[in-house]
Amino acid sequence: MKYHGINALKDGYKEEGEVAMTEVMIKQAAIDMILSQGEKIYPYEGCGVLLRRTGQETITEVIACRNAVADKATEHFLIDPLELAEIEKESIGNEYEIAGFYHTHPDQKAVVSAEDGRFMIPGMIYAILSVYDGHPERLRFYRKDDPSDKEKETGYMGG
Amino acid sequence: MSMGRIFVSATLRSFFGRNASFETDHNTIKGMLDFLTDEYPDSRNILFAEDGKLRSFIRIYVDTEDRTDPAKWEETVLDSQEVLLLPAIAGGAPTKSIISEDRRKETLLSDKEVERYEKHLLLRQIGVKGQKRIKAARVVVVGAGALGSPVIQYLAAAGVGNIKVIDFDEVSINNLQNQVLHTSRDLDRPKVASARDKVRNINRDILFEDVNLKLEADNIADEIDGYDLVIDCSDNYKARYLVNDACVICDIPLVFGAIYQFEGQVSVFHYEDGPCYRCLFPSPPPAGLVPTCAEGGSISPLAGIIGSIQATEALKIIMGIGETLSGKLLTVDSLYLRSKIIDVTKNEKCPICGEHPSISVIQDFDYDDFCGLKAEGDEVEIEGVTPEELSERIERGDNILIIDVREPHERAILKFPNAVVIPIGQLARRMKELDPSQDTIFICKEGKRSVLAITTLREAGYKGPLYNLKGGMDAMRDIIFSNEGAWL
């Protein structure tokens, strides 16, 4: 099985067998929504929630959130905790659950910054999309198992 | 009985037995958190870091009010209110290189350079891109002394394309103990000339600029403006404040380093919205209280440790990789080999990098006054004697009292045989040992702490004649007495 590559993935993914990566399953429709949000919101950082059906593995939907950072929104993002609580209580219901979060890096690599790392909740999936000159370039997924650990990149498969 | 209700975000529920809410008989956040971590011991590691602080990604609300601050954890939560344990989903862009993409792309590596920097190119975080940034970088090193020695040599070896070194001093024999850039053959040469030779031997492709100049408020901006990075390898407070202010005003990041005896410090200032030197140290210690490095001494390899860390920080900033010491101060105690990193926060009221800076031009600030370096006798009437005058009076057999305020280890290097030893801290108490009818002369290493000694005595109400040995023991060295050997 090959890692799913989207057209925007410039330097491709690690060859199969090179590193044993935990795979994240995600629907193409969800990927497309992240890409289009990253493109539209450029040069600011966009962010949102990754959803899957409760008990299922594949991420099927995303909910775009407001970037609550007032200034410097080109370099930082924040999802208002109360907005997230609202989404949890009102929009998601029992049918879906939060698998993780995504945000974009305008004109920056799709890697976990030191600040990103400090805010990662263990067990959650974090997707980062690099957007150069307004064009989505690379989407990468990361996860942390223990709060003190360094995050690990995880491969992903489209479906 | 009150009932405290807690809502746990779905994103955190796996650490609390997948429960969405709890009802407790606690009515403070503190009590509720204790309850949760007692019920679910593993959650303690999720909520709190090793240092006991709440982790960055946790937010605690009471209804719509943010009460994440532990100072608010003892406030009573009403029955009608709900405590929300929520995640902060946040982050920031990764560190950017201070070398623009355009400048990197314009820079090419020759075959010879690819071979020379192979060990950099093999590192995933550096590679060809990083090496090109290093080559494109223009760096100013202030001071070619103890810290400058490793910094200049490592920057040259690493391939920094343009290095400017500023120093006004010449190489003296006591520099050779820890200024490994200079050798016995360089004695009495300008330090920058010695630095130029060493850099040429390491790497001829580097554009090296040597500036034999004492930095002042009116010349520093011209020297550093347009460069990418400044590395402070100076050995005194005046230079540190001057370099810091110039970097903030010229908007250049600064890698700071300092050594004293067995201890060293490193930090990064005015970088990525981080604090500056003045945020950390709003004012210097009183003049004379802390001897400068030249007076205080330091163990030989300490400059190598601290300078090497400065050079590493500089390269990381140039390439935009890793995590820097911006907003942090590293201290290294080489005597007991302990190191720690303390957080340094940006001071909103900082006079130079705060929200309403009061300093906007480097010239406007009197550094000599600020650092207590005003020429002796400017404010308080302090009379001085020159080494020649003192030696004449000693030769004549005048009835004078000489007080040595130096530290024991300093006296061990060079004794002043007929001097009475009184540390500055004991002066006021031991005032009775002085005779107001007799001329009393104070000596220290450089003639600065002796001024402090006289000021201290005057403040304590001493009325007798007090004199300061100008230039201290350092200036006394060249005096030869007729009965040489009996004295110095």
Image: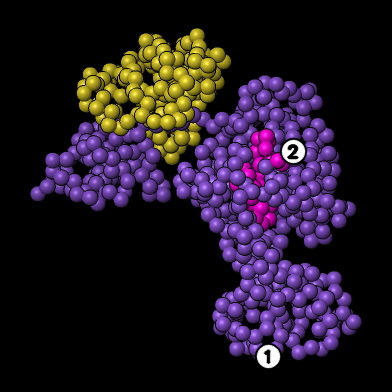
Rendered location of residue B276, percent (x, y): 55, 46
Instruction: Tell me the number on the disc at residue B42.
Output: none
Rendered location of residue B261, percent (x, y): 65, 61
Q: Is residue B64 left or right of residue B430?
A: left
Rendered location of residue A43, percent (x, y): 47, 21
Q: Residue at x 9, y 49 (%)?
A: B1
Q: Which chain is yellow?
A: A
Cα–Cα gap, marks 1 and 2: 58 Å
Q: Is residue B58 visible?
A: yes
Tell me the crowding category of disc 2: few under 14, some 14 to 19, or many 20 or more residues within 10 angstroms, Cα based: many
The disc numbered 2 marks a residue on which chain?
A: B
Instruction: Tell me the number on the disc at residue B437.
Output: 1
Q: Residue at x 70, y 34 (%)?
A: B138
Q: Which of the 4 image quadrants contains residue B384? A: bottom right
Q: Amino acid at mark 2?
A: Ile
Q: Is residue A121 left or right of residue B28?
A: right
Q: Residue at x 43, y 37 (%)?
A: A118
- For the record, the magenta segment spans B222-247
Q: Which of the 4 image quadrants contains residue B312? A: top right
Q: Residue at x 38, y 49 (%)?
A: B52
Task: Choose the circle earlier in sequence order: 1 or 2.
Answer: 2
Mark 1 or 2: in front is 1
Secondary structure state at the residue bearing disc 1: loop
Does the magenta portion include B129? no
Q: Decide: is B462 above or below B10.
A: below
Q: Is residue B382 left or right of residue B273?
A: right
Question: Contact, CB < 8 Å: mark 1 with mark 2?
Answer: no
Q: Which chain is purple?
A: B
List the residue tagged with mark 2.
B163
